[in-house]
Image (cartoon, helix red, strand yellow):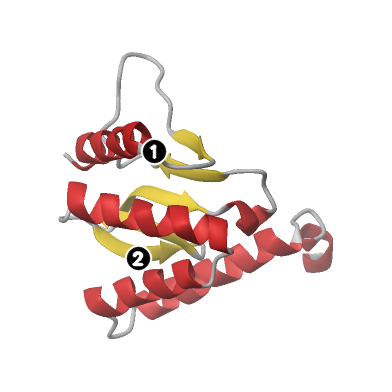
Amino acid sequence: MAKESNAKFTAAEREAMQERARELKAAKGAQNKAADEALVVAKIAAMAPADRKIAERVHAIVREAAPLLDAKTWYGMQAYFKDGKVVCFFQDAAKFKSRYSTFGFQDAANLDDGSMWPTSFAVISLDTATEKRIADLVRQAAN
């Protein structure tokens, strides 16, 4: 039965789930903020050059815009937590063989705006306006 259910997930999805299981197990151990951040930086360093350039900049923007957020990995991706809950994350294009990277928000993000609002953004490059938009969204999400 387990093999049958695994067939519904791609190899990349199964790896992400295994990474999440390792993250949860490590969280029960003696990891600290510095170790968590080092793991995020290592994940960024392992990305393809184009994704890495964006991910490094996104990391710097988030750290500057909302220093209260904790940097940790989440399903093997860089993510930023508040009170143990994911606020935002960056998914590199190569993670699931997508044509673009994604910067997204989870339920803990304070982005509510009426009855519908965006929670995920395709990112193919960064310019000053895009960086400002990310910083503004992160500040709002973290409050």
Q: Which residue is mark 1?
A: 127
Going by the numbered disc 1, the residue's amino acid type is Asp
* Residue at x 43% of width, y 26% of height: 118
Q: How many marks?
A: 2
Q: Position of residue 23 (x, y in %)?
A: 44, 72
Going by the numbered disc 2, the residue's amino acid type is Lys
* Residue at x 27% of width, y 50% of height: 61
Q: Position of residue 9 (x, y in %)?
A: 74, 56
Instruction: Report whether 48 appears left or right of 112.
Output: right
Q: Quadrant of residue 130?
A: top left
> Is residue 54 visible in this depiction of the protein?
yes
Q: Which quarter shows the N terminus?
A: bottom right
Secondary structure category for the residue under label 2: strand
> Is residue 32 visible in this depiction of the protein?
no
Q: Quadrant of residue 104?
A: top left
Neighbourhood count class around disc 1 (C-alpha, 10 Å): few under 14, some 14–19, many 20 upward: few
Q: Quadrant of residue 136?
A: top left
Neighbourhood count class around disc 2 (C-alpha, 10 Å): few under 14, some 14–19, many 20 upward: many
Q: Which quarter shows the C terminus?
A: top left
* Residue farthest along the bottom direction in this orientation: 30
Q: Is residue 22 above or below residue 12?
A: below
Instruction: Report whether 28 appears left or right of 54.
Output: left
Q: Which mark is residue 72?
A: 2
Instruction: Report whether 56 appears left or right of 96.
Output: left
Q: Is residue 119 above or below residue 43?
A: above
